[in-house]
């Protein structure tokens, strides 16, 4: 139900140092950029915070570059920019596909990869891709910069190791060797929140991650072990059943998500042979 928006304070920063200073000196401040999740929460009576920090002027965080052999995607890069980037298209086409299926054009023009990571929804479209790509999340804070492996970043539903005085500045992706694959299942092909999504890589090793089937994105290590060990797809699907914990909610049922998850793993295995 739509309600009146609660009063809030908005700060703006022109530099990363200024942004970190605000976070340090004004506890409870929520960093924002595209606001594609925050605005929805405010519109319908949620209270993500009462103090906000606008990061959109930090243009350095929009860059998509390489450093040595790693793809470096700035936290403020939008889904549209991911799709247009020659570097992303060449190195991580499954991320391009995930970005293409996020909302409509308006959301793709505003939403950012850093926001998707920070929001931490298990239905975040880019998250399974970053999981199988074994990315690192780059955090900046008062003690300098640190890198957190993506598999260690989330601690639970919408919670992470990011401290309140830190900002996500980039995500770094090592070379991905093998065939890349991404599928999203929703009410329709796009402009819908995911019911289930799977990202996979098949090379010397198989890597798989599912979204919307647990409190956080799930790297399917036991399913991978079955496939990498030559046990076959049926053994892998048996392992999969013990790795996911889907729930019933407004978008789908746990039973449906289990069935679709198995179908997606089967499609990945046959489609990348």
Image: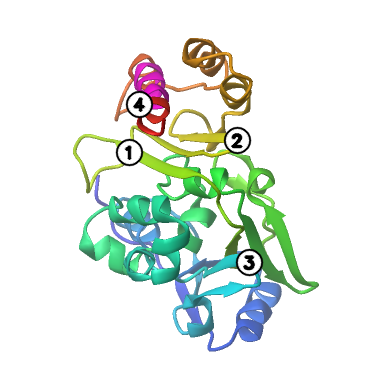
* Marks 3 & 4, CB-CB < 8 Å contact: no
139 in the magenta segment:
no
Which color scheme is applied? rainbow
**Is tag 2's residue or tag 3's residue first in the polypeptide sequence?**
3
Q: Secondary structure at mark 2?
A: loop
Q: Tag on residue 205?
A: 2
* Whether residue 217 can be seen here: yes
**Is tag 4's residue or tag 2's residue first in the polypeptide sequence?**
2
Secondary structure mostly seen in the magenta stretch: helix
What's the magenta region? 258-266
Q: Tag on residue 267?
A: 4
Residue 109 is situated, as x and y percent measured from the top left of the image, at 29, 68
Q: Which residue is mark 1?
A: 184
| Residue at x 49%, y 65% (from the top left corner) | 50
- Front label number (4 vs 2): 2
Q: Nearer the viewer, residue 65 or 77?
A: 65
101 to 198, vertically: above or below: below
Spatial CA span between label 1 and label 2: 22 Å
Crowd around label 4: few <14 · some 14–19 · many ≥20 (10 Å): few
Crowd around label 1: few <14 · some 14–19 · many ≥20 (10 Å): many
Place residue 269 in its image quadrant.
top left
């Amino acid at each position: 139900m739509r309600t009146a928006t609660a009063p809030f304070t908005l700060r703006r920063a022109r530099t990363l140092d200024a942004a970190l200073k605000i976070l340090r000196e004004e506890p409870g401040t929520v960093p924002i950029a595209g606001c594609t999740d925050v605005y929805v929460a405010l519109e319908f009576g949620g209270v993500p915070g009462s103090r906000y920090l606008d990061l959109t002027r930090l243009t350095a965080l929009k860059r998509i570059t390489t450093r040595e052999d790693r793809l470096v995607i700035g936290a403020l890069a939008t889904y549209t920019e991911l799709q247009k980037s020659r570097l992303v298209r060449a190195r991580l086409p499954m991320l391009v596909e995930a970005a293409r299926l996020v909302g409509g054009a308006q959301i793709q023009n505003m939403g950012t990869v850093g926001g998707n990571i920070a929001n931490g929804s298990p239905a975040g479209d880019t998250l399974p891709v970053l999981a199988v790509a074994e990315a690192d999340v780059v955090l900046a804070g008062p003690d300098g910069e640190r890198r957190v492996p993506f598999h260690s970043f989330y601690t639970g539903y919408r919670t992470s190791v990011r401290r309140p005085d830190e900002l996500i500045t980039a995500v770094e992706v090592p070379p991905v060797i093998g065939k890349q694959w991404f599928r999203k299942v929703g009410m329709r092909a796009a402009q819908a929140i995911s019911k289930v999504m799977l990202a996979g890589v098949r090379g010397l090793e198989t890597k798989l991650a599912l979204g919307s089937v647990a409190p956080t994105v799930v790297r399917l290590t036991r399913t991978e072990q079955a496939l990498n060990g030559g046990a076959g797809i049926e053994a892998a699907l048996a392992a999969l059943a013990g790795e996911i914990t889907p729930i019933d909610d407004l978008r789908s049922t746990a039973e449906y998500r289990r069935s679709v998850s198995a179908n997606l793993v089967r499609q990945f295995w046959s489609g990348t042979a």
